Image (cartoon, rainbow, N blue to C red):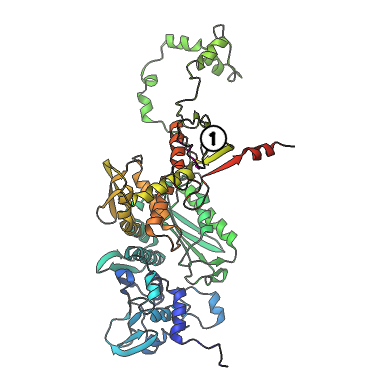
Amino acid sequence: MPDTIHLLPDHIANQIAAGEVIQRPASAVKELLENAVDAGATEIKLLVNDAGKALIQVIDNGKGMNASDAQNAFARHATSKISTIEDLFQIRTMGFRGEALASIAAVAQVSLKTRRAEDEMGTAVEIENSKVTDTSAVACPVGTSISMKNLFFNVPARRNFLKSNSAELKHIIEEFTRVALAFPEIYFSLSSNGQDVYHWEGGSFKQRAIQVLGNAYQTKLVTVGEKTDYLTITGFVGKPDTAKKTRSDQYFFVNRRFIKSAYLHHAVANAFEGLIAKENFPSYLLYIDVDPAQVDINVHPTKQEIKFEDDKIIYAFVQAAVRHALAQFSVAPSLDFSLDANIQQLDAIQKPFTDEKYNNTTKQSLYEGFSKKNQAHLISRSENASKQDWKSFFTDIPSSNEGLDTAGESYIVKASSMGLYKEGNPLQIEETASLLQLHQTYILAPSQSGVIIIHQQLAHERVLYEKFQKASAQPHATQKSLFPVVLELSVSDAILLEDIIEDLALIGYEIEPFGQNSFIIQGIPADVISGNEKNAIELLLEQFKHFSGDIKFSKREKLIRCMARQMAIKAGQALSHKEMHALIESLADCDIPTITASGAPTYVELKEDYLDGLFSK
């Protein structure tokens, strides 16, 4: 019988490897930019067409290659960074695996032009499907220009999984920004379909931070700088007033390599504890320089997830460095003892304290409680103060809780006329039952067979989800804003908003472009309270970006789920009897009232026999 195990042809092996290294156009951008950095370039230009699907070109003025190196660079496992196994533990360059160019050549049509300073002529190489189709001498400037066209042209299934142009361009910008932030001394430019997007001159780390984050951060950055024998931490954190509803301005770099680390983010968040709201995210740009032997950067194909030899030490240093910076620049909370100028205009200051007023004041028992030694706790009984006087404080309180809307109270209301008694409805609440809001999160109501506990936020999410689903067929009503709000976003967030702006219109948002990376909010859904439009959109974008990447969800489905989560009443929000009434009625009318779109229960029912069992011997 013939052998069943055989070696794969090189071009197929390269395509398989490409699936790890080149997942989308942004992956190729990252690898090419890092190669340009390693070549010692001081100027790097990135050009993309059709969000990288048609063209990705990187031009640098680095040291270039000779003819032999130009061809060998596309072979598998070819690298100039590693000679011995010990080199793996002293890596400070960016690209080192020797798979990137081979992977790119396996899934795109590649053209390379390169020349060294000492060579009169450069070298041009054409590669398609991992095979060199042409090599020639060519006149070109010092450095390297590499173009990859028609990404995944020979793997149609992979190409079909690419997202929209706006989504793919957003990923490209993210990778471009990360490399540019890591190497501020290098000039970077980016153009898309012939239009300039970024043009950043080389400079200091702070200058690059302002270029990326925007001029608004000019006076909003706090310098971080801690040096120890183990590591060095430098960079910037935004002052508390720069905290956002999104994670868009958060960057960690280890030895100039961008990394993702929820663990280290937690260290920064802890340093900001008490300075910003819990739902907000601090802005930071932190650079960690550590001995490469203490870091394993080869744990993931993208090299964005790394492993430290001692995570706890890094965590402690990061947290301490940020706290020290905030304290050093007087950002930490403090008591303000300065006198408000408005106080000087009060009657108590402007008008004289007459003898008559003094006598009237000193006769009161309250004055005695504060003026006599050890008597500040004393409330004296006067002859005129009877028990009936104290009861008078409560005579105006209504006998029932009907109509109480004060925040922080619990509400007991009748649940009559709620329409919750349809045949087969899971919310079987008795007509004479009362409702109770517990901890401003749960709504308790007796049912025909026990007690129902409704989670107000999850219940409202279900209601909104079904409403937005139906809005796809019939657009939701919009209320025009009396004072339209201007929303300024980063380039990547602006691209994302443009991609979903039509879907937002169906839900009730009227948003229009308003200059570069700016939008104007002309209207909001009719049932949304105005005044928080900007934060609402920012939070929506953040939730959309971090939504599950499961391909079974369409863009519309993701948006609907994000909107339902973002607009739902939150746990901890006090509800009036009318609001609880409306929420339960709306939940009962849902097609699937028992769970949210993500599968969490909206309510639980404790049966009477279960409750009896809790108290049985």
Above or below for 260 versus 13:
above
From which residue to which does the magenta span run? Answer: 419-426
Residue type at the position of mark 1:
Ala
x and y, in percent, of residue 491 in the image: 33, 59
Q: Which residue corresponds to mark 1?
A: 445
Residue nearest the viewer, comparing 552 with 20:
552
x and y, in percent, of residue 1 in the image: 58, 93
Q: Main secondary structure of the magenta part?
A: loop
**Residue at position x 30%, y 50% in the image:** 505
Q: Secondary structure at mark 1?
A: strand
Residue nearest the viewer, comparing 7 with 81:
7
x and y, in percent, of residue 485 in the image: 29, 45
x and y, in percent, of residue 327 in the image: 49, 47
Q: Is residue 580 visible?
A: yes
- The part of the image, by quadrant, that contains residue 450 is top right
- Identify the residue at the far right of this view: 617
Residue 471 magenta-highlighted: no
**Residue at position x 47%, y 80% in the image:** 81
Query: Is 492 on the left or on the right of 275, as rendered?
Result: left
- Identify the residue at the far bottom of this view: 1
Dot 1 alpha-carbon crowd within 10 angstroms: few under 14, some 14 to 19, many 20 or more: many
Query: Is 616 on the left or on the right of 406, as rendered?
Result: right
Residue nearest the viewer, comparing 589 with 259:
589
Residue 421 magenta-highlighted: yes
Query: Is 204 on the left or on the right of 358, as rendered?
Result: left
